[in-house]
Amino acid sequence: MKYQVGDKILVLHSNEEGEVIDIINDKMVMIEVRGVKFPAYMDQIDFPYFKRFTEKKLFPPKKEKIYVEDVRKEKTQVQKVIDGLWLSFFPKFESDEFGDDVVVELKVYLVNRTDKAYNFNYSLQYFGKPEFELRNEINAFNDFYLHDVDFEDMNDSPSFNFDFSLLKTEKSKADYYETFVKIKPKQLFNRIEELKQKGEANFTYRLFEFYPDKPLDLDLDLPVKGAKVYSLQDIRKHLQPARSVVDLHIEKLSDSWKQMSNAEILGIQLKEFEKWYELAIVHRQPQLIIIHGIGTGKLRDEIHDLLRGKKEVKSFVNQYHPNFGYGATEIYFQY
């Protein structure tokens, strides 16, 4: 192969020098230029030695007179496009025994095309069970390499889950934002074929366009007579983001729980459950995990009784979970 990891290269269209950091396939490599990593076809780059040689002059060029009207105007700075935060997949191809290019793995990147920096918690789950977890931060207009995923594992219902918060907090912005990407095998196959036909290097999913504002303190109960009624789409813009996992342990909900009776504690826990359940429904969340603990089983039984009467619940199960043991119930919704 012409290039190897560590080779210094020249990007032909921008005349910038960089370095090869990974080999994607026999036609494409991953390069880094001034701290930015991106894929490039091999015919778009070259070794920089010829450029360096031709730039060396035996004699300095003779200075010419420059007239005012000939002075070049200062270049205007190109404004960076702000279009959201994306999850990007770079397929790595290899030739099989028939000479066909097949995908063997996917390189997963987080791409930030916003002017804000974020903390993030990331987890990859198969059939609801965590396989890979990472906690880090990503700066504005930057990208972050997450990990590689074997292509054959994409048949196991992968879910790419994220929990974001602002690195520099703002009073008007939400404390956190949860989102996820689930890719069905047929959908993935179509994206790969489309990518190959267009000669592109990656395919992406937008996680959000703008980091959400802090939610208004809205009551989810039915409006009183004469009150203005908003559409569900308008309400979603102002509601608190839904959470995929809710912990109902009382010490997480109140600092003064030791002075409470069991009935008071149960009331607070059920009210918290109803709040996050309603938010999950409004945001049309596919599933929700409620951590109720084991204890006497009173809270679990109360929640299960409530779930049996809710039409949005497709099913729920209290089984062993690698993170929560038997102390959590997984709820699956239908819309």
Image: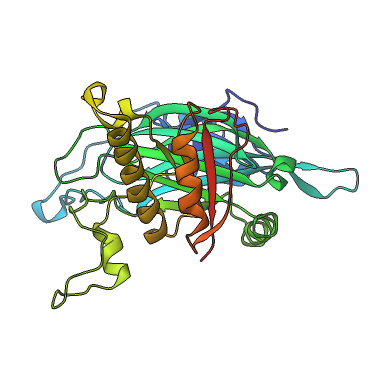
What residue is shown at x 51% (from left), y 66% (from top)? Answer: 335
Residue 51 in sight from this viewpoint: no
Residue sitting at x 11%, y 50%:
67
**Is 14 on the left-hand or right-hand side of 250?**
right
Residue at the far bottom in the pictured view: 226
Q: In the depicted view, which residue is nearer to us: 152 or 76?
A: 152
> Image quadrant of residue 190?
bottom right
Q: What x and y, as percent, mark residue 248? A: 38, 35
The structure's colour scheme is rainbow
- Residue 20 image point, x, y percent: 56, 30
Q: Is residue 229 or residue 319 the one in the foreground? A: 319
Q: What is the total number of numbered labels drawn onto the structure image?
A: 0
The image shows residue 287 at horizontal and vertical percentages of 51, 50
Residue depicted at x 25% and y 39%: 175
In this rendered view, identify the residue nearer to me: 275 or 172: 275
| Location of the N terminus (image quadrant) | top right
Give the image location of residue 19, x and y in percent: 51, 28
Residue that lies at the very extreme toward the left in this rendered image: 68
Please give left or right for residue 321 compared with residue 280 in the image.
Answer: right
Residue 2 showing in the rendered view: yes
Q: Residue at x 27, y 29 (%)?
A: 261
